[in-house]
Image (cartoon, rainbow, N blue to C red):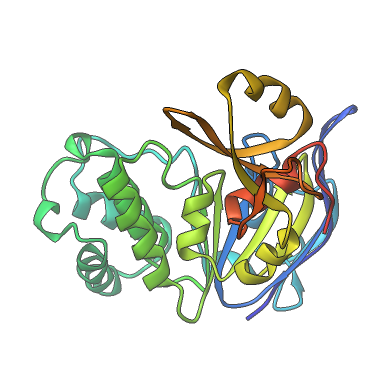
Amino acid sequence: MKLTIEHLSKQYRRDFWGLRDFNLELGPGVIGLLGPNGAGKSTLMRMLATITKPTAGTIKWNDVDIAKSPDTLRTVLGYLPQDFGVYPNLNAVEFLEYMAAIKGLDAKTARRRIDELLLVVNLKDAARRPLGGYSGGMKQRIGIAQALLNDPQLLIVDEPTVGLDPEERVRFRNLLSDLSGERIVVLSTHIVSDVEATATEIVVVNKGCKLGHHAPEKLLKVLDGKVWQWLVPSAELPALKQQHIVSGMLRHSEGVQVRVVSEHSPSSKAQAILPSLEDVYLYLVSANGVKH
């Protein structure tokens, strides 16, 4: 299976493009689409889900243009949008039966899939409780269950861990990793740790443009020898932030241990350290970032 995006653009106003000349080719695995809020991630997700039409460019599923043949993709698509909502008075089984009917599953297949998926998302014991009483994490898990009803080959999840507590976030990441297998999972997020924990490939996006697309290990090499750490007095922090990308700070009684991204050693006291994905992300989306 293959998803190909060629010169994709989306214009909302004369002076505003949500996405501009975007190119990407994806195969099976978890692809982390990483970028700040407003970067164009949700615009891309909606076009992939055949909800929004592009202004220019094409999206191809196994070499078939989905603008011309949307059902080619829709039959194998699972989608969890950022603003996913539930019917609070329905329980999990009733809600999934309703969604299965919308997706065109026959009753026998739907019952089997619902039983399987409630186990997969660990909601079997809460299956008869009204969804209005579910926690944020439970609602996200029922959202994943509805997206998986048709056993999709392409699964799209948009900002799925926003608002979740740390335990639910870890559970959700593990669930996405387990679901990858022989399918393409596109995870859109602005939270670096989400893609760090799950993604086999990472695509960094900002202002509607692709800044990088690599396996995590290769992406880290972008900053080899460019991340530094040392102790500075608190009074020097404002000036330091003006001059460099500060990716981390840890306060001590004798000052602040800073983590800085810089092409060259920013201080005689600075020591080179191994880069993290957070460092790379901040570097790429900053004004000083270089496209890769």
In which quadrant will I find the N terminus? bottom right
Count of numbered circles on the image: 0
Tell me: residue 9, above or below residue 72: above
Task: Judge from the rendering whether residue 270 lies leftward or rightward of residue 153; answer left or right.
Answer: right
Q: Is residue 101 visible?
A: no
> Which of the 4 quarters of the picture holds residue 213?
bottom right
Q: Where in the figure is residue 277, as x and y percent of width and height?
A: 59, 55
- The reply to whether residue 13 is in sight is yes
Residue 274: image location, x then y, percent: 60, 60
Residue located at (62% from left, 55% from top) = 33
For image coordinates 32% across by 40% down, the residue present is 86
Q: Is residue 172 left or right of residue 72?
A: left
Q: Quadrant of residue 69?
A: bottom right
Judging depth in this view, the residue of 219 and 120 nearest the camera is: 219
Residue 148 on image: x %, y % = 39, 65
Q: Quadrant of the C terminus?
A: bottom right
Residue 252 at x, y = what percent? 43, 32
Residue that appears at 56% across and 43% down: 190
Residue at far right of view: 14
Kindly indicate the quadrant of the structure image that contains residue 5. bottom right
Query: On the picture, is 237 further left or further right than 156?
Result: right
Near-viewer residue (266 or 89): 266
105 horizontally vs 267: left or right: left
